[in-house]
Image (cartoon, grey):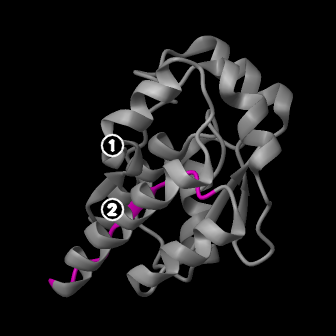
Amino acid sequence: MGVTGSGKTTVGQALAESLGWPFCDADDLHPPENVAKMAAGEALTDADRWPWLDRIVAASRERASRGESAIVACSALKASYRERLQHAGDVRFVYLRGSEATLAARLARRRHRYMPAALLPSQLATLEEPDDALTVDIRLEIDEQVRAIRAGLGLAAPDSLTMRDE
């Protein structure tokens, strides 16, 4: 979890690969109305987010019903959103934390399919930093973040990791 530019997709994919688990980007579960709003530079409201969060829960429950674990990249900005996501079952949160300057610099270098860098201030304003999540510094290299997450969640460390640059 984390705001735009924190590396949720990159780190999530690397973590999933290291574990041999499937990866789900919650961005792919946004309804078209949410995507259009964000693409227009409008921040989502709680009313916009609830159906999206419910889609994430449903997808996670479906996977769990098959006995599968997965890595899900999701902003999960508020405590109430994380509480909603807990309905998916055994959910553990990893907070990818970075300063506004670090995040802004990352966003200046990337192009997201619908999330403009201009929405970073609204995401930071919405963010309620978790006190019950594993917190990882986004300034670490991707492989270091993956190792920290695996260690922090008690997942066996891999013998070797194949990482990609962010």
Image quadrant where one finds the N terminus: bottom right
User: Where residue 58 sits: x, y (%)?
Assistant: 29, 71
In the displayed structure, 165 sits above or below 158; it is above
- Which image quarter: residue 121? top right
Name the residue at 32% across, 43% down: 28
- Separation of marks 1 and 2 at Cα, in angstroms: 9 Å
Looking at the image, residue 166 lies above or below residue 21: above
User: Residue 55 has which mark?
Assistant: 2
Amino acid type, residue under disc 2 in the picture: Arg
Q: Residues within 10 Å of mark 2 (few under 14, many from 20)?
A: some
Q: Earlier in the sequence, mark 1 or mark 2?
A: 1
Q: Residue at x 33, y 62 (%)?
A: 55
Magenta range is 66-76
**Depth check, front residue: 129 or 47:** 47
Look at label 1 and name its amino acid.
Pro
**Residue 58 visible in rendering:** yes
Q: Nearer the viewer, residue 6 or 19?
A: 6
Residue 139 appearing in the image:
no
Q: Position of residue 140 (x, y in %)?
A: 70, 44
Instruction: Assess whether mark 2 and mark 1 are in contact (beta carbons under 8 angstroms).
Output: yes
Q: Residues within 10 Å of mark 1 (few under 14, many from 20)?
A: some
Look at the magenta stretch and give its main secondary structure.
loop
Q: Residue at horizontal 43%, vertical 37%?
A: 34
Q: Is residue 51 left or right of 5 when viewed as pictured?
A: left
Say which mark, if any, is on residue 31: 1
Indicate left or right for 121 with 54 as reference.
right
Residue pictured at 43% horizontal, 42% vertical? 163
Q: Is residue 86 above or below residue 74?
A: below
Q: Farthest residue to the front: give it.
A: 47
**Left-right relation of 85 to 129:** left
Is 130 within the magenta?
A: no
